[in-house]
Image (cartoon, rainbow, N blue to C red):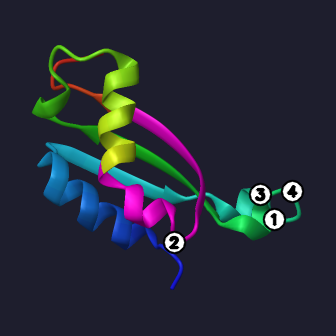
Amino acid sequence: MATSSQDIERVLGAALQPHSLRVQDDSHLHAGHAGASEGRHFSVQVVSERFNGLSRLARHRLVYDALRSEIEHGIHALAIDARAPGDP
């Protein structure tokens, strides 16, 4: 079964206990592009205390680690905006 926005929200909500979380399916923007048939494209905006004091790379790693099983089920691309509370 292909991963949905709701699946990503469920997994990240449990893993990161975010203050805010927005997941958008951007697959329709990539229809016909190379790789589009390999999975879906998503954008994630997440604000979580778990990101306090972490670099951008470390924040992205937390997101990817949480979504490891979902990536195997149909995420081709993931755009991540990961912030700690109070970040601009």
From the image, tell me which residue sits under label 1.
31
Q: Which residue is mark 4?
A: 33
* Image side of residue 4 versus residue 20, left or right: right
**Which mark's residue is nearer the viewer, 3 or 2?**
2
- Front residue of 10/57: it is 57
Residue type for callout 3: His
The stretch in magenta equals 66-81
Residue highlighted by disc 3: 30
Residue 79 part of the magenta-drawn span = yes
Q: Is residue 76 above or below residue 59?
A: below
**Left or right: 29, with 81 as reference point:** right
Left or right relative to 71: residue 35: right
Image point 37% across, 55% down: which residue?
Answer: 67
- Between the C-alphas of marks 4 and 1, the distance is 6 Å
Question: Mark 2: which amino acid?
Answer: His
Q: Position of residue 80 (x, y in %)?
A: 46, 38
Residue 87 in the image: state x and y as whole percent.
Answer: 24, 17
Residue 35: % across, % down: 79, 58
Label 4, label 2: how many angstroms apart (C-alpha)?
A: 19 Å
Q: Residue drawn 51% across and 72% down? A: 73
Identify the mark nearer the N-term, 3 or 2: 3
Q: Earlier in the sequence, mark 2 or mark 1?
A: 1
- CB of mark 1 within 8 Å of CB of mark 3? yes
